[in-house]
Amino acid sequence: MTTYPTTEMPSTDTAVRRTDRLAGPAPRPGIFDELSKREIRRAVLSGIAIPGYQVPFGSREMPVARGWGSGGLQVTLSLVGQDTRLKVIDQGEDAGVNASNLRRLVVGHVGCEEETDTREADVIQSRHRIPEQPLQDGQVLVLQVPGAEPLAGIVKNMDEQRRMHAEADYSKMWVRLYEDIVHNGLITNAAGYPVLVEGRYVMTPSPIPRWDVPKLNHSEGVTVLSAGREKRIFAVPPHTLVEPLTFEDRPFEVERTPGAACRLCGSDDTYIVQEPGPDGTFSTWVCSDTDFCRRRRAGDAPEVTALEAALAHTREESTI
Amino acid sequence: MSTMNAPAASVTSASAPSVPAAPRPDQLTERLGLGIDRVMAESGLWAPQLAARAFGQARGDVTRATQLLRTHRTSLPRLGRSLPVRAGELRVVRRISSAFRNPPGGQVLGRTLDYVGRLLDLLPEEEGRQRAVLASESAHEHHDHHGHEHPGHEHPQHGHEDEVERAPGHVLSVFREMDIVAPPGDHDDPEPYDITRHPARPGVPRSALLQTMARADTGALLYLWYGSEWKPGGQEAHEVPGELRHGFLPIRVEHPHTGRPVTVGDVRVSEVVSFHSLTRASELPRHLDVGYGMCFGHNERKAISMAGADILLGHYEGTERAAGLQHDVLLTLDGLDITGYTEHQKLPHHAEYRSVLERATAAAAHQAGPHRTGPHPGDTA
């Protein structure tokens, strides 16, 4: 039981007891009170109940800028306990500045376990990537979201955006994709490719590369997406249908560069990013997922990546 | 963020770094009071000591200090609400009306940087301060009721105790009696919207708009108002602050046992009521439109901008412009939101960027593809 400064005023004593009951178990000082965490968990549950639907929530101010993962941080802090194994990545890296900072914050606040091995993590907070390792039942992926509204670039009026979602009127989105093909010959949406969740809501998957989009389909894990600045939370529960928006004669394309492979582990079936080669030009490639790359080199990574597994699953579905 | 932005001094100096004495919070409050007031207003939290601390720790960056203060509040449970107070209870330390030469209750100039032409003072700091105090004292000897006092703003010996404190009636109520202001709208908005708990979107009640503006980044709010089509010189007439006040408002809570209101402290606020003569279609310009602005601390620029923007919002309510204006007020004024987006630009984006480059390459390849190489010789198409 928490000890409070004793006082001879009986009324204060009553107030203290009331405070204690209101705020739940003895809070750890700093960052977040328990009532707020509960509010976040409710929003997450609503999001899981209505896959792809953007749940408004009273986003709190975090010790990081609104844009440095304040939304993801609120969800992560609401979910982790002392025995949680937490992995935090940015651009796929555990050692990125944003990832290190957020991990230090959460571990310092909650005292949970730091983890870099995707297989061992209970909660994975990420910015811009989904790990190459297929997620398992029970794992939660928390994605940081800079812009929650996939229709924002199409209609500015928020009432109209909500109407379109409510009536599943996505005709303007389809027209936009069609015009893209007419003008450019292909769909130029790069990262954050819009998806249709369970045949109902169009959702942004956050600015993950298209490489990661198929991994959301029928995932074993839960994906929670949280936008702190825009004050919205949405989610993809396990075994949910997630389809990138495209036309029948325009197959969805992920980023592949023929002949390119990670210079460290040699993989050509992972998402790789360019690095300067010996000649100073961006001529070499490395895995963006540093944990997977390290395990590939150690012979501790699976043959089949999450993307290959997801694509195989989709092919299987389409032949049934 | 604080852990990432540790001062680099210790890295560059070879020997053990000598740390200069940090200014105490009360020194900051005295010398940089307007900056600290701004931090409190943009935080939406009245806490002078904490704000001074935050201001120092943020090295004078108002928005970072605001982030620190708001984040600190997030760490605390919310235990209750204060009772509503009437703005008429405001005990003024400054009160001016641009609309009247001599408004009911009089002009009280109070402590301000206005009215005196100023040059950068190049005297040694201590001497300059001493002279300002002396000048201030001699001015007090000939103190007239129009308060031509405080030629300098550095007079630590003379704080609030010798400033006028009273609660004159509002110009607005005089105007109401004269029936020359637009009657209050028929809004049913008794329970204030809480923007810290419910995200505000266009269509929210006026209380949400006013709260958002009271916490807004001062510069952003100033721009929204000044950049609107009424300024500058967009119309021949512009709105006039009928009232500008700076002073103290009591904070009362309900006693947990007796249920009676108990004053537990006070907050210092700036308040502006602006009037504008506007016409609408099928309406004679008989009534003045009223705009209201209030924020924590001494920030007249913000209160004036807020009152002006409030008139703007009221004027366009129910029109096509309303949603766009409300969108701008609700979603582009919060200092933490808008700078958060700016800060995020500095984070690595290379995983995302590879995807962008890949699409650009693919689009270029498509443009250069066989079907776009132009007509072949002999092609009749």
Image (cartoon, coloured by chain):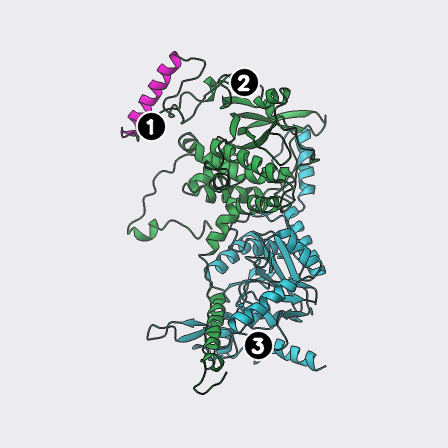
Q: Position of residue B10 (x, y in %)?
A: 34, 50
As drawn, which residue projects farthest toward the bottom?
B378
> Does the residue at mark 2 contact the one at mark 3 (Cβ under 8 Å)?
no
At label 2, the amino acid type is: Arg
Q: Would residue A120 appear left or right of B7 to someone viewing this image?
A: right
Tell me where the magenta segment starts and ends, as one range. B122-142
As drawn, which residue projects farthest toward the left?
B123
A199 up-or-down from B97: above or below: below
Q: Would residue A71 appear left or right of A218 to someone viewing this image?
A: left
Disc 2 target residue: B166
Disc 1 target residue: B118
Q: Is residue B103 visible to us here?
A: yes
* Colour that chain A carries in the picture: cyan
At label 1, the amino acid type is: Arg
Q: CA distance from mark 2 to mark 3?
A: 74 Å
Callout 3: chain = A
> Would you identify the image quadrant in which residue A51 lies?
bottom right
Callout 2: chain = B
Q: Position of residue B259 (x, y in %)?
A: 72, 27
Query: Label 3: few (<14), some or many (≥20) within 10 Å?
Result: some
